[in-house]
Every structure is written in structure tokens, then in C-alpha cells.
Image: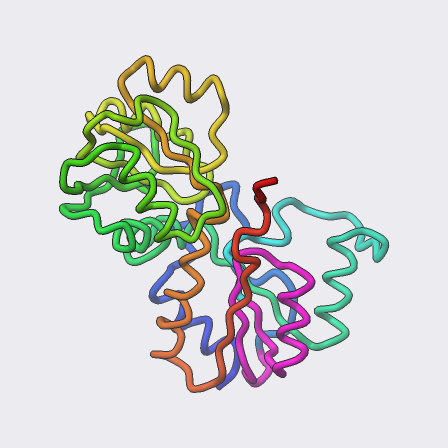
């Protein structure tokens, strides 16, 4: 199977038209007319991700976060981006990103997050000002601090920050993998008790608490890294090549 044939099938599950206007999902580097030899999945394009592809003979890397977001005018091999592009080209490895289309799609980042956390009656969290990315659902009523421990464990997060009254009974939960602070107001309007998302700023948390919404921040990485294992399962259904995953296991955050 050629790489492009695999990507055509993949895009039937996670269509590129779902991505946001500012995004750059799709092919980043490489020649997709070549025969597919293997796939490596990773949240970000780390040097370790490329090395895993080299070691295993894989010639396609699929990342969640694009390496190339903005237009570039030169490929400087003394920069981090330049060095990674050089490694990819020298080793005949194609790079593909599946970003906000994966966040929005059925069965993507946020649906998978809801499933992992055991949310029931899951719906889109949306209003006229936001795209249909975040979700909300329900858990059995429990203390916020107890649910925070469950989330931290299930997402294998190094740490999780709970903003608000840890002894509040919560039931209606909003979620947005990655950086989802734009959905705080929507969650408040929906009457959610808590939102789970990453990259929360101090004043965003203060304002949300004042409006009655708790925030649980397990980190950008932990709130999304689970999806690479879901993608592995998806790709095994449409390809017979070896598929590998690479993860830093939340080493971006450490407790001293």
C-alpha cells in the first residue's frame, strides 16, 4: 500500500476539512507516493520519534501537533525545525499531522477523553461563538478531589491542578483536550460543575471559580497523549504494516 492510500483511508475517519482555519493538518514533509513500510505515532515530533522510525524502518510519522504551523522562508539546519526536517528527508520519512480535525472528529481526542474518564450522556459543548470541539457529560456525583485523583491516574499525569473548592460535589463535567480555556464561558453557560483542560492561566481560574466552575488541569500533554493509542487501533484496522508509538510519558512536567 502506498502512503497516500493509507492517508486517504485515514482521512475518511478524521477528515481534514474539520481542521480550524489557522491550523496546518495534513502532509508536512515527504513523498506520499512511496510504499508504506511502517508507521510511528506520537503527540509531538521529538528527535526520539524520528529515531524510533529510523530504528524500526517505518517511513511515516503521524503526529497530533504539526511541526510546521506557519509559513517558513528558509530551512536553516541550525534550528530545531531545520534539523528535524533534515533527519526526515535524509531517512526518507514522511511526516503527517492530524491536529484540530482530530480534536473535533467523532472518536477523536475529546470523545476518547470522555470514554477514558467514564463520562456518560456525552454531548458537544458549543454555542454560537465556538466550534464543536469540546464535550460535556456526566459522572456519578462525587467530591471534586476524588474525581481529580481518578483523572490523574487514568491519564497518567505527572500532576494535576484543581482550581476551586476541592470538597464540592460534582456531576456535570466539561472536557477539552489540550488548551481549552476558550470553552470556560461555554461550560459555565451550560451549567457544568467542572472543566478538564490544559494550559490554564491564573486569572482564568480565578474568574471561573467566581462564576461557580471548577477547573482541573492535568497538563496539555496528559490531556491529549492518550489519543496516539486510539490511533494505533484505528490504523491497525486499515493497514497491515507495523505500527509503533512513542511517548515521553508526561516528562514535560516534573515534581521536585
Left or right, 63 with respect to 135, comes to right
Q: Is residue 34 above or below residue 40?
A: below
Q: List x then y, in percent, for residue 95.
A: 60, 66
Q: Is residue 199 above or below residue 83?
A: above
Residue 213, quarter of the rendered image: top left
Magenta stretch: includes residue 38: yes
Left or right, 91 with respect to 8, comes to right
Q: List x then y, in percent, for residue 226.
A: 41, 57
Front in this rendered view, residue 17 or 173? 173
* Total numbered badges shown on the rendered structure: 0
Part of the protein shown in magenta: 33-61
Q: List x then y, in percent, for residue 136.
A: 23, 39
How is the rendered protein coloured? rainbow
Left or right, 55 with respect to 201, comes to right
Q: List x then y, in percent, for residue 18.
A: 38, 50
Residue extending furthest front?
A: 256
Q: Is residue 5 above or below residue 247?
A: below
Front in this rendered view, residue 12 or 48? 48
The residue at the point 27 percent across, 38 percent down is 146
The residue at the point 28 percent across, 31 percent down is 194
Q: Quadrant of the C terminus?
A: top right
The residue at the point 21 percent across, 47 percent down is 119
Front in this rendered view, residue 194 or 166? 166
Magenta stretch: includes residue 34: yes
Left or right, 90 with respect to 103, comes to right
Residue extending furthest top?
A: 210
Residue 50, quarter of the rendered image: bottom right
Amino acid at each position: 500500500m502506498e502512503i497516500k492510500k493509507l492517508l486517504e483511508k485515514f482521512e475518511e475517519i478524521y477528515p481534514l476539512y474539520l481542521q480550524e482555519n489557522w491550523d496546518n493538518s495534513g502532509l508536512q514533509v515527504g513523498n506520499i507516493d512511496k510504499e508504506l513500510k511502517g508507521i510511528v505515532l506520537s503527540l509531538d515530533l521529538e528527535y526520539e520519534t524520528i529515531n524510533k522510525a529510523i530504528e524500526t524502518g517505518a517511513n511515516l510519522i503521524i503526529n497530533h501537533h504539526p511541526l510546521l504551523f506557519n509559513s517558513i522562508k528558509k530551512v536553516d539546519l541550525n534550528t530545531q525545525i531545520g534539523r528535524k526536517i533534515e533527519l526526515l528527508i535524509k531517512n526518507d520519512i514522511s511526516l503527517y499531522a492530524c491536529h484540530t480535525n482530530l480534536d473535533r472528529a467523532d472518536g477523536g481526542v475529546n470523545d476518547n477523553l470522555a470514554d477514558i474518564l467514564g463520562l456518560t450522556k456525552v454531548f458537544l459543548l458549543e454555542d454560537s461563538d465556538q466550534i464543536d470541539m469540546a464535550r460535556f457529560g456526566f459522572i456519578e456525583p462525587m467530591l471534586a478531589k476524588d474525581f481529580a485523583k481518578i483523572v490523574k491516574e487514568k491519564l497518567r499525569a505527572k500532576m494535576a491542578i484543581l482550581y476551586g473548592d476541592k470538597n464540592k460535589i460534582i456531576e456535570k463535567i466539561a472536557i477539552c483536550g489540550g488548551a481549552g480555556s476558550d470553552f470556560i464561558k461555554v461550560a459555565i453557560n451550560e451549567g457544568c460543575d467542572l472543566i478538564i483542560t490544559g494550559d490554564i492561566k491564573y486569572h482564568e481560574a480565578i474568574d471561573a471559580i467566581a462564576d461557580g466552575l471548577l477547573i482541573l488541569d492535568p497538563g496539555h500533554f496528559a490531556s491529549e497523549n492518550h489519543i496516539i493509542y486510539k490511533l494505533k487501533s484505528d490504523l491497525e484496522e486499515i493497514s497491515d504494516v507495523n505500527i509503533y508509538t512513542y511517548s515521553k510519558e508526561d516528562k514535560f512536567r516534573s515534581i521536585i
